[in-house]
Image (tube, helix red, strand yellow):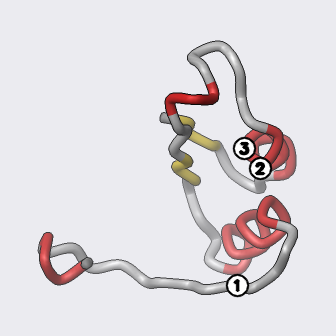
Amino acid sequence: MLKSVGANAAVHIDSSMDVPLAVCSAASQLEADLIVVGRGSCAGIDRLRTKVYSIIRQSPCPVLSV
């Protein structure tokens, strides 16, 4: 998929059941400057799903929720 759009990015796969912990751990290990998370339309414009909210709370860097 990355090649089809001409992007160059690392892919990390974690089979952990704790998604927020896996995302924040990867961000720490990679010394990320930003985490970008997408929300489905079913979440509503004013509500954050529990996992996204946990990522925002635990993140070692700024989080952009789109």
Would you say 35 lies left or right of 15 here?
left
Q: In this figure, which residue is indicated by the disc labeled 1?
A: 14
Q: Which element is circle 3 on?
A: helix
Compared to residue 39, the image places residue 42 above or below, namely above
Residue at 52 percent across and 49 percent down: it is 36
Assess disc 2: are there few (<14), some (14-19) or many (≥20) residues with their C-alpha within 10 Å of its C-alpha.
some
Q: Can you say whether 49 is above or below 6 in the image?
A: above
Q: Quadrant of residue 39?
A: top right
Query: Tag 3: residue type?
Result: Val
Sequence-wise, the earlier of marks 3 and 1 is 1
Where 63 falls versus 24 (above or below)? above
Q: Are marks 3 and 2 in contact (CB under 8 Å)?
A: yes
Percent across and percent down for residue 4 are 13, 78
Q: How far from the left and from the top, in percent, is residue 20? A: 80, 59
* Residue, disc 2: 55
Please report whichever mark, 2 or 1, sits nearer to the chain's N-terminal start.
1
> Which residue lies under the disc numbered 3?
52
Q: Residue at x 77, y 52 (%)?
A: 59
Q: Could you tell me which residue is drawn at 48 percent across and 34 percent down?
A: 66
